Amino acid sequence: MRLSKRAKVLLRLAVALALAFIYIPLLVIGVQAFNSSKILKWPPPGFTLEWFSKAFESESAREALLTSLEAGLVATTIAIVLGSLIALALGRRRFFGREAISFLVVIPIALPGIVTGVALSNTFTQVLGISLSLMTVIIGHATFCIVVVYNNVVARLRRTSGSLEEASSDLGADTWQTFRLVTFPSLRTAVAAGALLAFALSFDEIIVTTFTIGAGEETLPIWIFRNLFRPNQLPIVDAVAVILILISIIPVYIAHRLSSDEGGVGGRGGAGGGGPSAAPSAIAEAEATAAH
Amino acid sequence: MGRRLAGLFYHRPKLQLGALLAAPMAWLVLLYLGALAILLITAFWTVNPLSGTVIKEFSLENFEELVNVPVYREIVWRTVRTAVLVTLTDAIIAFPIAFYMAKVAGRRGKAILVIAVLMPLWSSYLVKVLAWREIIAEHGIINWGLGPLGLHGPGEGLVAVWLVFTYLWLPYMVLPIFAGLERIPNSLISASEDLGASPFTTFRRVILPLVFPAVVAGSIFTFSLTLGDYIAPKLVSNEQFIGTSIFASITNNQPFAAAFALVPIVIVIAYLGVARRLGAFEHV
């Protein structure tokens, strides 16, 4: 678009301000983690690495991390199985009730997390008489993770045609062989991308978690939440926060690799591998993370 | 065994469908829809104020309380107001950056900006709220910056909640608007320019009408995420929102929490209805 010089300058300024708004808070917390004083003060009076070593030594933080990993892995596994099954069923078929099912999959993520949380906790404790535990957390997480895997896999199925499967069965392969040798290889990266998102979603979830977690258990977000209110622990929480920000680069990198490895198939995004095609996949991610 | 099983499914689409959908439907229908249905039923139960036990009999008491007690009306209104304000602020911040990404930046710049906007989506939600808590703190960076000017930052409260929500959901607004702008062919913009329209006219008459559904699509996220959140308000204010009230009543009065949880559902459904009419679902 042809823009006047002044318009371009103004636009650049707006972009710079938006980026500053996005990144300054992350920088602030990065600086606070090295604050030598226990008391929150800007600018920090001195520099220390003490909080990082304390964070690594913290028994409760380590346990919470393990709990989060366990919940994330199990919930993701359930979501991979159920999400892929729904995608395979809906991907290339037309049948009565198809729209209803695709809507049903989205509900857990479309409704505010607190609704899912209250509904599940209510059902578990009031009706089924199950006491809350890590298991109930996993059930909650898996429920809203299904849609993420489903979205990725169904998008892939829509982009690839069914002719390869037809060729495979024409050549004498049975249903299972076709799935194992033809369908699954073409879905692998989509499943991986969905699984990555599902895991990230579960790892970061706090709202459904607070409603479904047992008394003695703690995931990492719950650990952070509880320790925020303890003044002594705050610097350690800051250090954990910085570690989490750094760790979050890993999934961005993997997601990037997954979509660029695809080349012509277009990853999770539209056609073509490059930058612009990242947009649809970005939206899928946005939708996915929307469960909070 | 595997072959025999495969043979069973050969050319039997209904059987295939049933086998594929049995487990996921059991999970989503029995567990999730079941839980929502029970939520709906529980909303009509009450709690014995003396013993604290749940009375499983039909009653409209919870809903009467929600409608008649001014505090609850005020809480719902405050939450919706905040959600609208957050949505508008996000749209205003998101539009220039999305526009720059889609129509001005080069290929490389675009790729970098997409990642720059996406990155915070992956970093922990709580970490972001914590960052703001420290920014607005009494001895935080805002007061440090404003101090020499003789000013004082907003501190904890409604303004902080507005800032934090705007921050948290900004990427959800940028990405749909960016995708919407990407879909507008450049030739359309050139045609408008060639026909003598000023950039402002092109923007108002060509770009804005075409991208509006995408803005609405983004607003679904910013609006409904704000509506149900209770962690952020709890961490940066003492104000009551729908989420905080539900959380506060869940331990002592589960039926009332269930009834209150229906409020955001109704509001979100109404909002989705409006969004659909504005065309938000047409391309997304």
Image (cartoon, coloured by chain):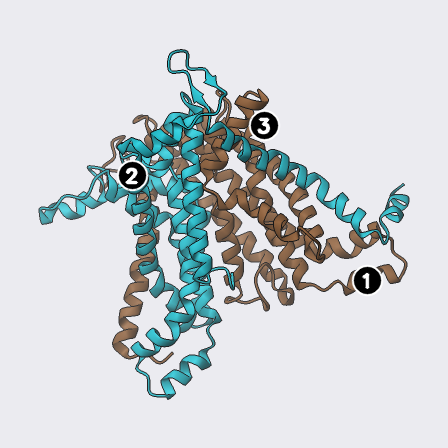
Chain colours: A brown, B cyan
Residue furthest to the bottom:
B195
Q: Badge 2: few (under 14), some or many (20 or more) residues near its Cα, within 10 Å?
A: many
Question: Height in image: B79 above or below A90?
Answer: above
Few, some or many C-alpha atoms within 10 Å of disc 1 (few <14, some 14-19, many ≥20)?
few
Query: In the picture, residue A40 is in which quadrant?
Result: top left
SS for tag 2? helix
Question: Amino acid under label 2?
Answer: Arg
Amino acid beneath label 3: Met
Seen in the picture, residue B256 relative to B18 is either above or below; the reply is above
Q: Is residue A206 visible?
A: no
Q: Give the percent coordinates (x, y) of residue A112.
A: 45, 41
Q: CA distance from mark 3 to mark 1?
A: 41 Å
Q: Chain of mark 1?
A: A
Few, some or many residues within 10 Å of mark 3 (<14, 14–19, 20+): some
Instruction: Determine the residue positioned at 73% across, 55% down.
Output: A185
Task: Tell whether label 2 touches label 1 (CB within 8 Å).
Answer: no
Give the mark count.
3
Position of the N terminus of chain B, as image quadrant, is top right
Residue A234 visible:
yes
In the rendered view, would you say B29 is above or below A265?
above
Say whether marks 3 and 2 touch (CB < 8 Å): no
Which quadrant of the figure has residue A37? top left
Give the labeled residue for mark 2. B133
Determine which of the numbered discs, if any, sits on residue A135 in the image: 3
**What residue did someone put label 1 on?**
A166
What kind of element bears circle 3? Answer: helix
